[in-house]
Amino acid sequence: MERILSPENLLNAYKAVQRNKGCGGIDKMSCEQMLPWLLANKDALIRSLQDGSFRPNPVKRVEIPKDNGKMRLLGIPTVIDRMVQQAINQTLTPIYERQFSPRSFGFRPRRGCHDALRGAQKIIDAGYVYVVDLDLERFFDTVCHSKLIEILSRTIKDGRVVSLIHKYLRSGVMNKGVFEMSEEGTPQGGPLSQLLSNIMLNELDKELERRGLPFVRYADDSMIFCKSKRAAIRVKESITRFIEGELYLKVNKEKTVVSYVRGVKYLGYTFCVSKGKCQLAVHPKAKAKMKAKLKELTSRSNGWGFAKRKQKLTECISGWVGYYHLANVKRFLMDTDSWLRRRIRMCIWKAWKLPKTRIKNLIRCGINKYDARRWGYVKGYWRVSGSPIMHLAASSQKLHQAGYHDDGFISRMASKIGTAVCGTARTVVWEVGKCENRRQMPFVISIYLLPDSYIIIYKKSLEKCFSRDFNILEQLGESLGCLACIGYHLCNWLVAEILEGKELGGYKLMVVREACLQLHVTHADG
């Protein structure tokens, strides 16, 4: 308890709550009001935590829709309770991190969804091509308090800390002004619930490791891998008995399936196996959800101005591409790129409203008066958005000048992601550009490194531009071969150390540090 209530730990907890913001709980205290309250009541709060008289407030019930049409139940604690939970979380996390399985990736420092997916890839590459897709029914709402307290008591010897956690588990819920007791579950929404869920499911991880079963787990989403369907069925039955008999959790038998790994959805991705190698692909539901979101952002009737729409589109596209960059989504994004530009042109045509306004704006955009008058009275927003007139009036270049991304924006984002070429390897993008003075700089190669990416040098494109300088690629590829599959946080300085000032075939390599690594190839005498 003394470590939890140390001034440094409480200060870090306060900063974390302020940084995460969020709405207030049942007392309606905001994050901005927390500091004045703490200055006046800090000592009393610490004393109550030390002597055990502290009583947490009930959480505020909030419902958010899920993809399947159902509602996800969240519990929002008050800001003071969030700070206390954060202080407990900061103290217990380093202790339990030493106990957690390396195959657990959810709600843990320096681990995430991409790590879980790469771990699954390695297991599938090893021949475990059948999977038990384990689904726990309403996990966060059905955690057994007594079992969780028992597990906590094995590690935490300070009874005051265990008692405080138990108080939070039983603090109750305010649902539309009505108090409800919480006999089970760890309400999602508080900083402590994520750690407690990992502590509970760590018992499942230990059991799987004891049996020698390869698996990956992200929060309550678990996948257990086997080499045969028969073995997978046996594992499903035995693990179900363990979860329900030992952990007192409920397995959703309808959604827990045994199948070949191809097509299985996990964290928005799916798996493809070709020639014994596993490749990641975006699940069709994730693609449909992305297009539905873009359709919502470019709706004619949402009343947004162009500035807000541009911001929302950029955030949506960048976030989606950033998450799904492990898969080869180039073709999908190229198709989406063209469709999205048409949606933007439709919004522009809608905003012009009256025929006289449309005629005036078409003429202003370079359309001759005859065509402007002919098209100004045409009805049908979607029809006009795909017409040659709108392609000229609102060309990709003009959209770019107006603040929208130009033609091929999403496609170029896809090119930075690249194409899967060998296992988990990602294609490294490089661009060849001509300069006015070929003696000083015949070409420039830009190499973009993504996490766990391979450096791939393509000969074809460079040969097409400069056939006589073809051998530079082979020499450059040999030098970069030792850099395959290095981490993003290592690549900048490692590449600089290896390649700085090197000469290859009359060319000198210079390393330039930017947002991404670039290698500029110039003549040694230039």
Image (tube, rainbow, N blue to C red):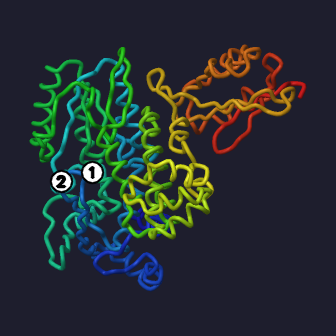
Residue 90 placed where, x, y %?
42, 57
Q: Which residue, as the protein is rendered here, is positioned at the far bottom? A: 40
The residue pinned by badge 2 equals 143
Under circle 1, the secondary element is helix
Q: Is residue 295 visible?
A: yes
Q: In the rendered image of this protein, does residue 290 appear above or below residue 376?
A: above
In the picture, the disc for residue 108 is: none
Quarter in which the N terminus is drawn: bottom left
Q: Are marks 1 and 2 in contact (CB under 8 Å)?
A: yes
Q: Is residue 365 left or right of residue 318?
A: right
State which quadrant residue 295 falls in: bottom left
Q: Which residue, as the protein is rendered here, is positioned at the far front? A: 370
Residue 358 placed where, x, y %?
50, 65
Which amino acid is tagged 2? Val
Q: Is residue 153 visible?
A: no
Q: Nearer the viewer, residue 406 or 82?
A: 406
The residue pinned by badge 1 equals 197
Mark 2 is surrounded, within 10 Å at the Cα level, by few (under 14), some (14 to 19) or many (20 or more) other residues, namely: many
Q: In the rendered image of this protein, does residue 114 appear above or below residue 74?
A: above
Q: Is residue 144 left or right of residue 426?
A: left
Quarter in which the C terminus is drawn: top right
Residue 444 placed where, x, y %?
73, 31
